[in-house]
Image: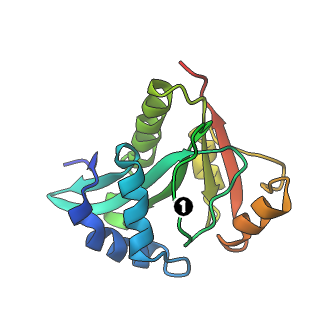
């Protein structure tokens, strides 16, 4: 059976935490911050299921372009006038990879964005994954993936060396 995305439930957060500690061993976030993202925008948060078990998760929320959320920090609230959906994390264990799950999730976000009048997706690529996200329409904001102001650059640095801020313009449908 191919992996498939389902809504992420609050009862899934222990498994989300376990997966992120495998996938993001060098960049783990506190469990309560994962819960905050899920609670603020459940429509953008999914779990990847295969053979009855969770093999991945994805978190996204409305945000402002070029305003990079600091990793492992509280969001507090969503902005009143978002202009992008920020794809915060897509973490897939090896047994869930290779079946197009990342592309399926991006298509889910495109549908959500268009439904809400948002014309772009944004993400921070880590671990050299920018070519993966480029295949799904994301482009570095600048040639080096940096953002313009000092606060945003500092926030980008919280994702580790080589992090790249990327945007996919999708139109408003």
User: Compared with residue 20, is residue 9 higher up or lower down, i.e. above or below?
Assistant: above
Secondary element under disc 1, as helix, strand or loop, is: loop
- Image side of residue 77 versus residue 128, left or right: left
Q: Residue at x 37, y 51 (%)?
A: 45
Image location (x, y in percent) of residue 134: 64, 44
User: Compared with residue 169, is residue 157 higher up or lower down, i.e. above or below?
Assistant: below
For residue 137, what is the image quadrant?
A: top right
In front of the other: 53 or 69: 69
User: Compared with residue 4, is residue 152 higher up or lower down, i.e. above or below?
Assistant: below
In front of the other: 50 or 146: 146
Image location (x, y in percent) of residue 9: 24, 56
Q: Residue at x 39, y 72 (%)?
A: 32
Alpha-carbon neighbours of circle 1 within 10 Å: few (<14), some, or many (≥20)?
some
Question: Can you name the residue that lies furthest to the top here?
Answer: 173
Q: Residue at x 47, y 40 (%)?
A: 106
Question: Is residue 19 at all visible to an observer of this figure?
Answer: yes
- The colour scheme used to paint the residues is rainbow
Question: Is residue 97 at all visible to an observer of this figure?
Answer: no
- Image side of residue 44 versus residue 167, left or right: left
In front of the other: 168 or 38: 38
User: Compared with residue 87, is residue 169 higher up or lower down, i.e. above or below?
Assistant: above
- Image side of residue 79 versus residue 38, left or right: right
The mark tally for this picture is 1
Q: Residue at x 51, y 54 (%)?
A: 77
Residue at which label 1 appears = 75
Question: Can you name the residue that lies furthest to the left here?
Answer: 52
In front of the other: 108 or 42: 42
Image location (x, y in percent) of residue 42: 35, 48
């Amino acid at each position: 059976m191919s992996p498939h995305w389902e809504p992420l439930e609050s009862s899934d957060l222990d498994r989300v935490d376990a997966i992120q500690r495998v996938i993001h061993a060098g960049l783990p976030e506190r469990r309560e911050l994962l819960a905050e993202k899920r609670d603020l925008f459940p429509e953008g948060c999914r779990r990847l299921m295969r053979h009855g078990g969770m093999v991945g998760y994805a978190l996204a929320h409305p945000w402002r372009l070029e305003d990079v959320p600091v990793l492992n920090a509280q969001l507090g609230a969503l902005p009143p006038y978002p202009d992008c959906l920020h794809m915060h994390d897509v973490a897939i264990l090896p047994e869930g990879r290779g079946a197009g799950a990342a592309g399926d999730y991006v298509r889910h976000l495109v549908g959500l964005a268009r439904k809400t009048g948002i014309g772009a997706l944004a993400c921070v690529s880590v671990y050299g994954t920018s070519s993966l996200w480029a295949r799904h329409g994301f482009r570095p904001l600048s040639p080096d993936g940096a953002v313009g102001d000092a606060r945003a650059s500092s926030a980008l640095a919280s994702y580790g060396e080589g992090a790249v801020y990327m945007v996919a313009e999708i139109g408003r449908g």
